[in-house]
């Protein structure tokens, strides 16, 4: 009996691990408890499972000890519990983006069940995980960094983000779209980030960066298709509490240097991701060629309340989005030494506090369509009016350039038929039969509720005696068509998903 259960465990875990054998599994069948030691995780499967950007690559991932507890008679209602001691992940940056499969079928997704969403999928999705520590090591050409997370837990939640006592409460079925919604929360106690230069001799300054954050959590809402268990869309929300960052002038220069070293490879990875946006939208049932709904914008004069929906549609995920919430951010700017001061005060420092920082990223969406279904999105001012004017101008230019390109293709073919009367020339391709594509957009929104810059202080200055140098005047009422945030920045990038020669295609706007 024990050997049979070991083989079943080996069958499922071998999809995520390397060189796993039954002699590494210690199992007590009647108690439903087991132990595994010295596991080496499959870096390729882990990369795909975490959906890492293509500028990052996992070199190695290990776990020293795993404890398993299974309640055999309550698998439908109670989760399998995994207790891991320490996980070490080694990563590196890629100068050229990793190759991605062209289609979902080409991906290395052997761990996935491509059949109908069933009992095994519900058991795996409901697993409860507790990890003592996670250490991530990142190596780049310019710097090396480490991220350490302590006391991490992964558990299923209810749609209202309460711990579920029964696994059935952690799922919501969307019968209209034949999909199921899953709610997971990842929580940990402390975050420590350390970064330093790889080669100290390359710069005139070298001071390691240290960043500390208290309790944090990630809330993940996944929408899966019941027919084939594939993921349709995901919403990821990161919450950080009380982020503290102490920076000297040298460390600030180091941070800028590290950011500049990553900017180019991140830009190349983003361009690669845009090429696959059309495929992802088709998975979301937003057909690029058959979408008959006009992409028009209605004038708006302020944030619109979300439409009332009944569960589970209230928690539905219409499109993939990523969100970061940090409150507060305490930034302390300090002197390096007595010889190189930023101000004429010995041991001087300046504190900058940012309240309710929020960043939302919507990676792909049909350009110009309504945004009322975007999670945590506010329509500000008269944006829709002037964006609609930009679309009209772009459509006019695209039509003119397209007609010029078609006429330029017809003239050489006509001359070729005149020079060779007996030859058969290829007919020019009709514009109506050309390949079609649609203009897409990605949007990034940054919001800050309030910000305060304090006067320069010393180590002997009490916190209660700090005076604000720059702060918002909350007594002044804001106009009715503005948002509730002090700072609201929005960047929208419009792009075509396929690689193409402009304007040799028909553009649907």
Image: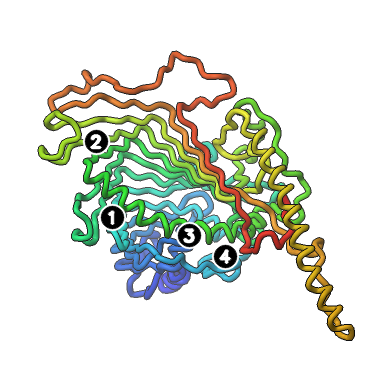
Q: Quadrant of residue 418?
A: bottom right
The residue labelled by disc 2 is 333
Name the residue: 56% across, 36% down.
377
**Residue 263 in the image, given as x and y percentages of width and height:** 41, 54
- Distance Cα–Cα, label 1 vs label 4: 34 Å
In this orientation, which residue lies closer to the viewer: 180 or 344?
A: 344
Q: Which is more toward the observer, 470 or 408? A: 408
Q: Is residue 348 left or right of residue 260?
A: left
Give the labeled residue for mark 1.
146
Dot 4: element? loop
Q: Which residue is mark 4?
A: 113
Q: What residue is at 62 percent from the left and 37 percent from the top?
A: 314
Q: Dot 3 corresponds to which residue?
A: 269
- Residue 213, given in percent of the width and then of the height, sits at 30, 41
Q: Secondary structure at mark 1?
A: strand
- Circle 4 packing at 10 Å, graded few (<14), some (14-19), many (20+), is some
Q: Earlier in the sequence, mark 4 or mark 2?
A: 4
Between circles 2 and 1, the one closer to the viewer is 2
Q: Nearer the viewer, mark 1 or mark 4?
A: 1
Sequence order check, earlier mark of 1 and 3 = 1
N-terminal label among 1 and 4: 4
Asked if residue 252 can be seen in this view, the reply is: yes
Residue 447 at what x, y percent from top left? Answer: 47, 34
Q: CA distance from mark 3 to mark 2?
A: 33 Å
User: Given this view, does label 1 or label 3 mark the residue nearer the observer?
Assistant: 3
Q: Earlier in the sequence, mark 3 or mark 4?
A: 4
Work out how far the residue at label 4 is from the one at label 2, CA to CA, in angstroms: 51 Å
Residue 87 visible in the picture: no
Report helix, strand or loop for mark 2.
Answer: strand
Vertical placement of 248 versus 397: above or below? above
């Amino acid at each position: 009996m024990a050997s049979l259960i070991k083989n079943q465990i080996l069958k499922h875990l071998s999809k995520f691990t390397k060189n796993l054998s039954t002699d590494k599994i210690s199992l007590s069948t009647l108690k439903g408890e087991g132990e595994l030691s010295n596991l080496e995780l499959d870096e390729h499967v882990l990369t795909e499972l975490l959906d890492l950007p293509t500028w990052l690559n996992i070199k190695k991932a290990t776990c020293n000890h795993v404890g398993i507890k299974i309640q055999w008679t309550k698998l439908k209602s109670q989760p399998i519990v995994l207790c891991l001691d320490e996980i070490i992940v080694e990563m590196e940056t890629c100068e050229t983006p990793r190759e991605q499969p062209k289609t979902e079928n080409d991906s290395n997704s052997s761990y996935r069940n491509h059949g109908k969403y069933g009992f095994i999928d519900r058991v795996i999705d409901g697993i409860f995980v507790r990890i003592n520590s996670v250490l991530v090591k990142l190596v780049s050409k310019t710097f090396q960094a480490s991220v350490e997370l302590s006391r991490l837990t992964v558990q299923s939640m209810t749609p209202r983000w309460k711990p579920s006592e029964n696994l059935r409460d952690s799922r919501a079925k969307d019968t209209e779209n034949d999909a199921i919604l899953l709610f997971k929360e990842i929580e940990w106690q402390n975050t420590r980030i350390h970064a330093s230069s790889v080669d100290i001799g390359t710069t005139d300054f070298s001071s390691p960066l240290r960043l500390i954050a208290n309790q944090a959590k990630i809330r993940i809402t996944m929408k899966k298709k019941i027919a084939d268990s594939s993921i349709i869309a995901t919403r990821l929300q990161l919450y950080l509490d009380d982020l503290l960052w102490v920076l000297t002038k040298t460390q600030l220069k180091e941070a800028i240097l590290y950011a500049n070293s990553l900017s180019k490879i991140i830009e190349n990875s983003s361009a690669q991701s845009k090429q696959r946006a059309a495929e992802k939208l088709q998975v979301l049932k937003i057909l690029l060629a058959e979408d008959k709904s006009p992409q028009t914008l209605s004038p708006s004069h302020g944030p619109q309340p979300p439409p009332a929906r009944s569960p589970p549609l209230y928690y539905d995920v219409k499109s993939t989005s990523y969100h970061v919430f940090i409150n507060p951010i305490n930034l302390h700017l300090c002197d390096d030494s007595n010889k190189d001061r930023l101000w004429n005060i010995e041991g001087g420092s300046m504190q900058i506090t940012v309240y309710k920082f929020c960043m939302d990223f919507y990676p792909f969406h049909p350009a110009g369509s309504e945004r009322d279904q975007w999670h945590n999105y506010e329509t500000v001012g008269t944006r829709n009016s002037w964006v609609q004017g930009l679309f009209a101008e772009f459509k006019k230019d695209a039509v003119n350039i397209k007609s010029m390109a078609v006429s330029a293709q017809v003239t050489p073919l006509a001359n070729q038929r005149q020079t060779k009367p007996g030859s058969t020339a290829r007919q020019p391709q009709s514009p109506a039969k050309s390949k079609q594509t649609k203009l897409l957009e990605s949007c990034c929104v940054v919001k800050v509720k309030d910000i305060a810059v304090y006067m320069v202080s010393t180590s002997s200055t009490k916190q209660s005696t700090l005076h604000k140098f720059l702060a918002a005047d909350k007594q002044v009422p804001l106009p009715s068509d503005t948002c509730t945030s002090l700072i609201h920045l929005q960047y929208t990038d419009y792009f075509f998903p396929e690689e193409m020669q402009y304007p040799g295609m028909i553009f649907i706007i």
